[in-house]
Image (cartoon, grey):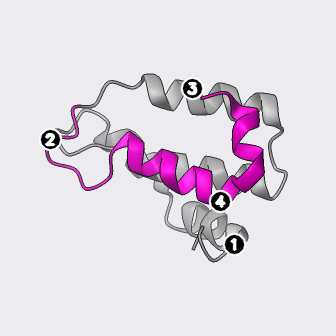
């Protein structure tokens, strides 16, 4: 959905299925990855629900979450690649 620029759809699904609450319950799991909050954050930025400073702060907080990714499909590098594609020239503004 992000790659198709359906940012409102990402936000709608995040809210409809209460993904924030679900994500919170799985943070201590060995299979946890920050992909759900990351994608929601990216969508929120693209529809101007949050500004650049808030986006940068939240993104850096997600990067700081120590997950070993041993059992996950998306790594932080994968998420950064998606972010780079979605933000295009704006990616350089986040300073990562």
At x 28%, y 31%, the residue is: 67
Alpha carbons under labels 4 and 3: distance apart = 17 Å
Horizontal and vertical percent for residue 37? Answer: 51, 46
Alpha carbons under labels 4 and 1: distance apart = 8 Å
**Mark 4–mark 3 CB contact (< 8 Å):** no
Name the residue tied to disc 3: 60
Alpha carbons under labels 4 and 2: distance apart = 26 Å
Name the residue tied to disc 1: 5
Horizontal and vertical percent for residue 64? Answer: 44, 22
- How many C-alpha atoms fall within 10 Å of the one at disc 1: few (<14), some, or many (≥20)? few
**Mark 4–mark 1 CB contact (< 8 Å):** yes
Question: Is 30 drawn above or below residue 71 in the view shown?
Answer: above
At x 60%, y 51%, the residue is: 84
Q: Nearer the viewer, mark 4 or mark 1?
A: 4
Does label 2 or label 1 sit earlier along the sequence? Answer: 1
Does label 4 or label 2 sit earlier along the sequence? Answer: 2
Horizontal and vertical percent for residue 66? Answer: 32, 24
Tell me the quarter of the picture where residue 65 sits: top left
The label shown at residue 70 is: 2
Alpha carbons under labels 2 and 3: distance apart = 21 Å
Does label 4 or label 3 sit earlier along the sequence? Answer: 3
- How many C-alpha atoms fall within 10 Å of the one at disc 3: few (<14), some, or many (≥20)? some
Q: Is residue 93 magenta?
A: yes
Does label 1 or label 3 sit earlier along the sequence? Answer: 1
Alpha carbons under labels 1 and 3: distance apart = 23 Å
**Mark 1–mark 3 CB contact (< 8 Å):** no
Q: In this view, does 3 lie to the left or right of 6?
A: left
Q: Can residue 36 be seen in this view?
A: yes
Residue range (magenta): 68-96
Q: Is residue 11 magenta?
A: no
Q: Is residue 39 left or right of residue 95?
A: left
């Amino acid at each position: 959905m992000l790659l198709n620029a359906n940012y409102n759809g990402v936000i709608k699904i995040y809210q409809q299925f209460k993904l924030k609450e679900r994500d919170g319950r799985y943070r201590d799991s060995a299979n946890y990855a920050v992909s759900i909050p990351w994608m929601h954050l990216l969508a929120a930025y693209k529809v101007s629900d949050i500004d650049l400073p808030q986006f940068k702060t939240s993104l850096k907080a997600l990067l700081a979450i120590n997950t070993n990714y041993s059992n996950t499909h998306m790594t932080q590098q994968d998420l950064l690649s998606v972010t780079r594609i979605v933000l295009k020239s704006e990616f350089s503004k986040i300073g990562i």
